[in-house]
Amino acid sequence: MNGNDHLIEIQDLGREYMAGDTTVSAIKEMSFFIDDGEFVSIVGQSGAGKSTLLAALGGLNRPTRGNVWVDTMDLYGLSSEQRADFRSEYVGFVFQSYQLITYLTAMENVKIPLSIAGVKKEDQADMAAVALEKVGLQDKKNRLPDQLSGGEQERVAIARAIVNRPPIVLADEPTGNLDSKTADDVINLLKQLNQEGQTVIMVTHNKKLCQHTDRTVHVRDGLCVIGEG
Amino acid sequence: MKLYNISLNNLRRRKGKVIFLVSGLLIGIATIVTLISITQSMSRDVEDRLDRFGANIVMTPRSENLSLSYGGISVGGVTYETVEFLESDLTNIRSIKNSQNLGIIAPKVLGPWELDGKRVLLMGADLQTELSLKTWWQFKGMPTGNPDELIVGSETARIFNLALGQSMKLGNDEFVVSTILHPTGGPEDGIIMGDLHRFQNVLGKPGRISMVEISAFCRGCPISEITLQIAEKFPNAKVTALKQAVMSKMQSIEMIKSFSYGVAVLVIFIGSLLVFVTMMGSVNERTREIGIFRAIGFRQGHIMQIILLEALVVGLIGGILGYLIGNGIAWLAIPFIIQESTLSHLDVTLGGVSLILSVALSLLASLYPAVKASRMDPSSALRAL
């Protein structure tokens, strides 16, 4: 594999951490690929290495060994600043626990990725409005995060992830803190994004959510145990 | 949405932190402004007093004789009949390097005169200039500005029984006593003053000058240098600075100034430390936020911009408020410290310096926290999520 055939290719990936004097293998060895336009879930128990894998896919966590190819780019062959540009252009992150900026309104949070993308101010307003409309929050655009419910904050986080239309959306436990009804809404939203052409990769410990995705990658003890379509 | 919106929104919605940060700088800048304004006023007060004392440089012809007088008792050896200056040469005084520090130049002709069988000293001078130089003189009558008027010292008036309006003949010239000085305890008690050019004629010294009194503005002026510069122009002159009394006062003020600057530096150091610690704390608090920004695609430079922009705004607010409050405190304090004095004006240069200093300190104190934040590994920052 060399990144030419698939949107994302992971090759012999390994990631170790030092926890005191002990070396912990968060990812022992993983190799798999994701094609353009797929909706993939990465499933595993807590501590299995799912979030580490997602961070490595997003260019946030340099692996100890192996390669991550995205759209023919060897991600960790790039400099730190080039990877920042890659994240700005290619990836939209939906974090665990929403992770909105508390002193910015919903609208301002959604505009954050646009502030460094060279988008004109008037276009920023239009793009953010479209993203907020897509998640159904256009009427709450001027609220601060602490004035929104958990589900609403999650939807703002999704709007922020998609506002500059990145080809890849990485979602880390997007329903982890939500009730089942709101969780369904969020999953449907991710499905809708996928249907509109974005590649969505979702990390979850909830196997039931796998039914909504095209493919599931099972992770256990830092190993990719099953990759199914 | 621009990066500065993020900075400004952060400051706007974290007022407590901003107040704390601004306070650190404000206290430092206000202390500096207060101390500088007060010491400037003190210095100005001493200089004004000096100006009121009159001439602070005296130029007399160089003489090899010693003046045999002490405490008003003369035992001979009068030196004023030595080689005198040419009036036409006096324009050279204004050509010295520090000419802008020169105020009044008061040339005089001196000579003895026999009146009713007694000798008296005549002094020819520009009387209006003389009166503006000797502001402490009090007198009866009113100087008219007329060239035939005389100003008479109190002792002279007593000895010769002179009264206001009385006519006097000096040589062939007629004069009228227009003013009689109150006793001053100085040499003017025993003289008769008249118009410079009239007295030059009376004394038979046309175009000659016996001595020159010079008032140099002392606000930062190098009085010793001015003295040397004049002496260079007049090799045959003895140029003396009457500076001892003033120097001792100025030295005291310099000491107060040095102490003030020391205190100001200490306060500003503490203020900067406060900003540094608060900014460091803020960066640590914002690890999560910085991680989010980096994950979204912010470069290291973007993170630095956000933090340094905040520091810039804090510095500007601290500088402006510090300058205004410092002047306010000085305005309130000066009347208690210096009698009959007030803060005369707002020093715009000091304002500019305060602003630059405040911004520079704020940026400097925030530089390390900003660099630290920008270099934060996004994966480490995200582990804090």
Image (cartoon, rainbow, N blue to C red):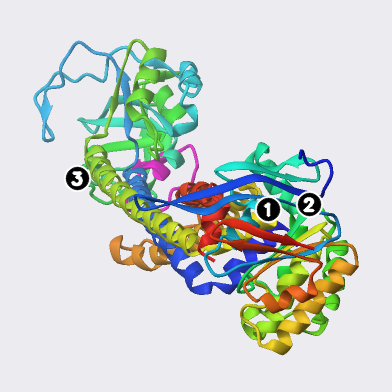
In the image, taking residue B337 as reference, residue A139 lies left or right, namely right
Q: Please state which of residues A217 and B207 is positioned toward the viewer in this rendering.
A: A217
Q: Which residue is drawn at 20% across and 10% down?
A: B64
Quadrant assignment, res A228: bottom right
When the figure is inspected, residue B96 is found, relative to residue B259, above or below; the finding is above
Q: Where does residue A199 sit, x and y in percent of width and height? A: 82, 60
Type of amino acid under label 1 = Leu
CA distance separating discs 1 and 2: 14 Å
Tell me the number on the disc at residue A89. 2
Tell me the number on the disc at residue B185. 3
Quadrant assignment, res A223: bottom right
In the image, taking residue B106 as reference, residue A170 lies left or right, namely right
CA distance separating discs 3 and 1: 97 Å
Q: Residues within 10 Å of mark 3 (few under 14, many from 20)?
A: few
Quarter the N terminus of chain B occupies: bottom right
Q: Is residue A146 visible?
A: yes
